[in-house]
C-alpha cells in the first residue's frame, strides 16, 4: 500500500469513474486500474463495485475511503510544510480575504504564467487564510493590518511560523450604492454611518476581533447583514442604503452600481502578503506578487 494508491481510491470515489479519476491525476486508466486491483488483493477485500457506468464503493470500501481521506490530508499537510516548492509544478494557490482585485490580478497572472494549469484562489475568512498558508495548501496569503488588528494578527503569524511583507497602504473606504445619499461626499465620518445598516463578511472565532474584516467600529443597534461572499455583499449594497468597509478597490467590469468614498481621518491600512517562514518564494509566487504590485500601481481611485 502506498500514497499513490490512496490518491487513486479517493479520486475514483469522488468522481465515480476510473476514466475521470485518471484524467484528473494525469495517469493512464489501465495503470490506475492495475494499481487499485493490486491494492484490493493486498487488503483482501474489494474497494469498488465496477459497472458499465462507473464505480461505486463497497461497504468495506466506504470505510477504507474515509480513512484514506484522513491519511491523505495529514500527508499533504506534512509534505507541503517540509517540501520545497517545485518550479516544474503546474499548480499554484493563493488564499485571500474578500477583495475585488482578486479577479483582474488572477487573469493577469494566468496570462504571464501559461504553464500553470491549475490556479486556485481560496477566498475565505482570516482564520482559514492563515491556516491555509501555515499548512502549505496555499503558498501565499493576502490579508490586511491596521492599528486595531495589528498586534493580534502579528501574534498569530508568529505562532504559525509565518512571515509577511507589506505591499500596499490605503485609507479606509466606505462602499455604498451609487444613488446613496452619501455617494457624492468627498469623505464620510463616523457620525454619517451611525444611522445606517451595514454589510460585513462573516468570520470564524468572532470572539477574536483581529479576525474581522471590518475597518470601522460597529455601532450599537446597527442592523448587520453577515455574508460569506462578495456577490451577496454587493447585491445588498445595490438594493439598500447599507454600507460596507474596505480598501477602496472595485472591479469595474463586474460591479456596476457600487461606489466608494474615503473615510475621514487617518485610517491607514496595510495590505500584507503572508508566506511560510523560511521558505523562498517559487517563481509562480514571485510572479503573483508582481501582478499584485502592478495592479496597485495602475489602479485609479
Image (cartoon, grey):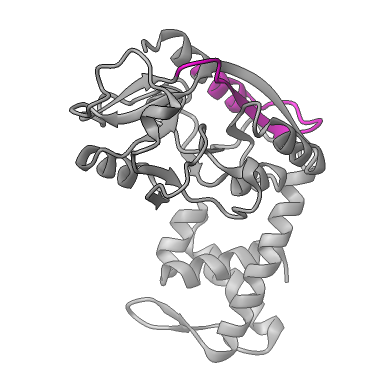
Outermost residue to the left: 179
Q: Position of residue 198 (x, y in %)?
A: 37, 42
Magenta residue check for 278: yes
Magenta residue check for 3: no
Q: Quadrant of residue 238?
A: top left
Q: Give the answer, above or below, for where 132 lies relative to 119.
A: below
Q: Quadrant where the C terminus lies?
A: top left
Apparent side of residue 195 relative to residue 286 in the rendered image (left or right): left
User: Foreground residue, 273 or 35?
Assistant: 273
Q: Give the answer, above or below, for where 56 lies relative to 15.
A: below
Apparent side of residue 114 relative to residue 72 in the rendered image (left or right): left
Instruction: Answer whether residue 10 is visible to the viewer in this image.
Output: yes
Instruction: Answer whether residue 106 is visible to the viewer in this image.
Output: no
Q: Give the answer, above or below, for where 49 lies relative to 291.
A: below
User: Foreground residue, 40 or 205?
Assistant: 205
Q: Which residues are magenta?
A: 264-291
- Counting every numbered tag in the picture gives 0
Q: Quadrant of residue 86?
A: top right
Residue appearing at x 33%, y 80% in the figure: 52
Q: Quadrant where the N terminus lies?
A: bottom right
Q: Position of residue 216 (x, y in %)?
A: 51, 32
User: Foreground residue, 19 or 212?
Assistant: 212
Residue appearing at x 40%, y 47% in the figure: 222
Apparent side of residue 164 relative to residue 34 in the rendered image (left or right): right
Q: Position of residue 233 (x, y in %)?
A: 34, 43
Amino acid at each position: 500500500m502506498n500514497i499513490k494508491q490512496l490518491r487513486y481510491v479517493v479520486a475514483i470515489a469522488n468522481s465515480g469513474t476510473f476514466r475521470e479519476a485518471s484524467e484528473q491525476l494525469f495517469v493512464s486508466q489501465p495503470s490506475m486500474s492495475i494499481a487499485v486491483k493490486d491494492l484490493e488483493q493486498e487488503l483482501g477485500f474489494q474497494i469498488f463495485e465496477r459497472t458499465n457506468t462507473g464505480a461505486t464503493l463497497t461497504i468495506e470500501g466506504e470505510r477504507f475511503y474515509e480513512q484514506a481521506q484522513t491519511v491523505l490530508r495529514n500527508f499533504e499537510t506534512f509534505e507541503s510544510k517540509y517540501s520545497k516548492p517545485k518550479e516544474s509544478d503546474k499548480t499554484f494557490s493563493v488564499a485571500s480575504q474578500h477583495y475585488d482585485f482578486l479577479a483582474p490580478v488572477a487573469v493577469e497572472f494566468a496570462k504571464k504564467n501559461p504553464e500553470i494549469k491549475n490556479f486556485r484562489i481560496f477566498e475565505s475568512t482570516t482564520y482559514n487564510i492563515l491556516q491555509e498558508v501555515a499548512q502549505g495548501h496555499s503558498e501565499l496569503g493576502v490579508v490586511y493590518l491596521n492599528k486595531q488588528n495589528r498586534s493580534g494578527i502579528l501574534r498569530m503569524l508568529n505562532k504559525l511560523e509565518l512571515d509577511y511583507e507589506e505591499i500596499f497602504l490605503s485609507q479606509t473606504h466606505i462602499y455604498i450604492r451609487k444613488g446613496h445619499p452619501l455617494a457624492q461626499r468627498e469623505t464620510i465620518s463616523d457620525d454619517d454611518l451611525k444611522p445606517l445598516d451595514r454589510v460585513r463578511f462573516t468570520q470564524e472565532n468572532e470572539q477574536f476581533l483581529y479576525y474581522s474584516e471590518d475597518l470601522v467600529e460597529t455601532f450599537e443597534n446597527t442592523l448587520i447583514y453577515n455574508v460569506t461572499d462578495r456577490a451577496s455583499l454587493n447585491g445588498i449594497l445595490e438594493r439598500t442604503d447599507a454600507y460596507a468597509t474596505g480598501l477602496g478597490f472595485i472591479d469595474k467590469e463586474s460591479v456596476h452600481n457600487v461606489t466608494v468614498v474615503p473615510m475621514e481621518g487617518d485610517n491607514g491600512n496595510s495590505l500584507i502578503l503572508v508566506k511560510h517562514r523560511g521558505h523562498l518564494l517559487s517563481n509562480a509566487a514571485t510572479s503573483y506578487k508582481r501582478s499584485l504590485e502592478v495592479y496597485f500601481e495602475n489602479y485609479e481611485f
